[in-house]
Each structure stands twice: as C-alpha cells, then as structure tokens.
C-alpha cells in the first residue's frame, strides 16, 4: 500500500489544473491515502484543493507572498514532509520541473520524469527520445519522486471532497535565491497549456506581421495560440508560444497548425491532442502522417476562406 504526497500548483488565486491531473494519476496507484502540500500566501486556496475528492489532508504552508514559491525555498519543506510517503508527485510543468529534482536530491533518490502511464505502484511509462519511443520503467527505490506529464491525465473534476486542512508557516525560505521579477506575455487569449482549442503557426507563416492572420483566426474561435520553434527562433512570436519538446506539452481537444512541417520535436508537444488539423502547402510534409484532417494548400488562401465560413 502506498501513501502519496502531491505538490499543488497555483497562480496566486486559482489552483492550476495540473494539480487535479496529478491527482488523477495518484488515484491510479494502490494508495492508502493521498495528501497535498500547498505553498501559498492566500489560505483560501486550500479550500479549493480540499474540495477535490479523494484527498485526505491538505498541508497548507503559508508563505509571506507567492514569490516564496521559489524551488530553492520550498523544496526542503516538500522533502521534509515527503519523508513519510512512498510517492511524492509533482506536475511536469515549469513549476514542477523546477522543484521536484531538488526534492528527489534531498531525499537521495533519482527523479522519475514525465510519467505518462501508471502500470502499478513501482512501474510507469514515460517518453524517451523526444517522445519517439515510450519506455516502461520499474523502480525499487524506497521512495518514488516523480513528475507527472499533465497532458497524459485528465483533470479530476470532482469537487465534493472534504479533506482536512493543516496549517504551518514556511521556514525554509532560501537566503541565496530571491525573486526579482516575473515577466509574462499579456494576452486575453486562453492559456496555451489548458486551452481546449489551439491554433499554431510555423515558419511557413513567414513573418511577425503575417502572424496576425493566425491570431485573427484564433480570436474568432476562442483558441489559444502556439507556434513551432522555427517561428519562435525567427522572432515571429514570443517564446512562451513554443509547442514541443523544448516548449509546452499540450493536449487540446482541437489542434490546428498552419505552415508547420511536423518535426518530431514539435509532435512530442501534441502527442495527446484530440483532433489534429494540418494545413501545409507541401503534401509530403510529415505533419500529415499524424494529422486527423489534412489540407494541402497555401495558408494565406485557406485562413481567409475559413474566416469567411465561420
Ligand atoms: C533539441 C531540439 C529541440 C527542439 N524543440 C522543438 C520544439 O520544442 N518545438 C518545435 O516546434 N521544434 C523544435 N525543434 C525544431 C524542429 O526540429 C524543427 O526545426 C521545427 O519544428 C520546424 O519548425 P516549422 O515546422 O515551423 O518549420 P519548417 O520545418 O521549415 O516547416 C515550415 C513548413 O511550412 C510550410 N509552408 C511554407 N509556406 C506555406 C504556406 N504559405 N502555406 C502553408 N504551408 C506553408 C512548408 O511546406 C513547411 O512544411 C527542436 C530541435 C532540436 C534539435
């Protein structure tokens, strides 16, 4: 039997969906109990976590402000709390990937990264070679510290939970690392990592100005916008729009991509997408091998036609 501790993620006012996705993964273990540790300034967030069904205890660790959530500050507390658990899980997001390796190191175990399927309490599937192959790994470490690939698990939507909440204060704030600034793109569009619809553009879009056509289509259908690394590297779009191995791993219901060839590093970011629609003027582009719907043609003709019909 297992005991699981999950590291919760939030934006200061809302619990990130990644927490509910990691909970779904944890429920697939043969677990005696599942607890969640939450670092936040706002105690109200613990009620959001406590309402998720299947959690025994929410360990609310009060921070003076949300910037205390730096990995260097919270990892020692997660490791200390994690000592009594067989599994310590965090999301495979920027936040989780920052914190969990430190937790693993402090607990003196290897980290298991990007769990995408749970076979049993010690056996997991995870992607390797940029998602080109899936490996099954079995571990016999006394504790398993893992990041969970959020695109591979649906969010646990239950809200009838009533977990107990215990409160403490953060005492491990690092003095060698401090928060300086957070700069993030301001956009009214849905968040790329949680949106149900995503419209992406690649090098084929051709320029920053031309990307307006992609944004217009996205706005028309209420989609988030993404891009290939080539489009980011060319300076057409900011790098927080990058989808793929070194960008964001996403799982929208609908993914439409324009002028993207379908390199393996891009495809690894959309492996769990629902319907993939590809528009490319080259009928031999590899994107058509994974697309559910493919249109061979010029995006500058096809997008205006789509806009007209919508
Ligand atoms: C370690 C590593 C990590 C990487 N990580 C990522 C990653 O996270 N994400 C990522 O995307 N890439 C990543 N890459 C880069 C990846 O290998 C590709 O170079 C990149 O995905 C190509 O982007 P693209 O499809 O936009 O460009 P291209 O491969 O140049 O394709 C452009 C496509 O646009 C089509 N096109 C051109 N004009 C039009 C038009 N008018 N209408 C319709 N179609 C048109 C062309 O036919 C072509 O297929 C990584 C590479 C490495 C080595």
Image: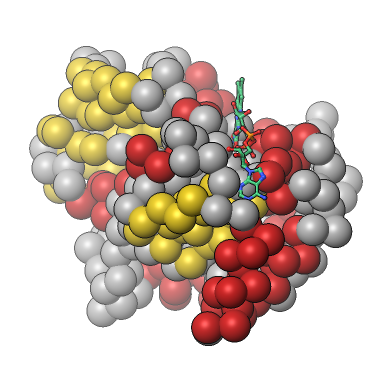
| Colouring used for the render | secondary structure
What residue is drawn where x is 51% and y is 22%?
A: 106
In the image, 144 versus 219, the foreground residue is: 219
On the question of residue 245 being in view, the answer is yes
Residue 3 image position (x, y, % from top left): 23, 42
In the image, 89 versus 126, the foreground residue is: 126
Q: Quadrant of the N terminus?
A: top left
Q: Where on the image, by quarter, is ligand 1?
A: top right
Occupied quadrant, residue 140: top left
Residue 117 image position (x, y, % from top left): 24, 38
What residue is drawn where x is 70% and y is 73%?
A: 216
In the image, 81 versus 113, the foreground residue is: 113
Residue 168 image position (x, y, % from top left): 54, 56
What residue is drawn where x is 62% and y is 57%?
A: 299
What residue is drawn where x is 70% and y is 35%?
A: 230
Using the image, determine if residue 39 lies above or below residue 121: below
Q: Is residue 105 left or right of residue 146?
A: right
On the question of residue 172 being in view, the answer is no
Q: Is residue 145 left or right of residue 174?
A: left
């Amino acid at each position: 039997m297992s005991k699981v501790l999950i590291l919760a993620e939030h934006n200061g006012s809302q619990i990130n969906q990644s927490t509910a996705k990691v909970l779904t993964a944890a429920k697939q273990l043969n677990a005696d109990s599942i607890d969640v540790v939450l670092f936040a300034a706002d105690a109200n967030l613990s009620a959001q976590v406590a309402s998720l069904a299947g959690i025994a205890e929410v360990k609310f660790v009060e921070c003076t402000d949300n910037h205390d959530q730096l990995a260097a500050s919270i990892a020692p507390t997660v490791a200390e709390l994690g000592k009594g658990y067989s599994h310590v899980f965090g999301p495979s997001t920027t936040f989780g990937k920052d914190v969990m390796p430190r937790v693993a190191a402090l607990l003196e175990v290897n980290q298991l990264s990007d769990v995408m399927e749970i076979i049993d309490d010690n056996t997991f599937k995870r992607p390797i070679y940029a998602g080109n192959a899936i490996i099954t790994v079995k571990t016999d470490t006394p504790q398993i510290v893992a990041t969970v690939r959020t695109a591979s698990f649906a969010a646990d939507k239950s809200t009838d939970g009533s977990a107990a909440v215990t409160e403490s204060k953060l005492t491990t704030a690092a003095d060698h690392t401090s928060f300086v600034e957070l700069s993030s793109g301001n956009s009214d569009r849905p968040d790329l990592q949680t949106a149900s619809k995503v419209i992406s553009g690649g090098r084929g879009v051709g320029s920053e100005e031309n990307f307006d056509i992609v944004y217009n289509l996205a706005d028309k259908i209420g989609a988030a916008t993404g891009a290939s690394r080539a489009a980011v590297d060319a300076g057409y779009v900011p790098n927080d729009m990058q989808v793929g191995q070194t960008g964001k791993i996403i799982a929208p219901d609908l993914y439409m991509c324009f002028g993207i060839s379908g390199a393996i590093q891009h495809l690894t970011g959309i492996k769990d997408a629902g319907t993939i629609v590809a528009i490319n003027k080259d009928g031999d582009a590899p994107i058509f091998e994974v697309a559910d719907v493919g249109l061979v043609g010029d995006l500058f003709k096809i997008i205006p036609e789509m806009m007209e019909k919508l």
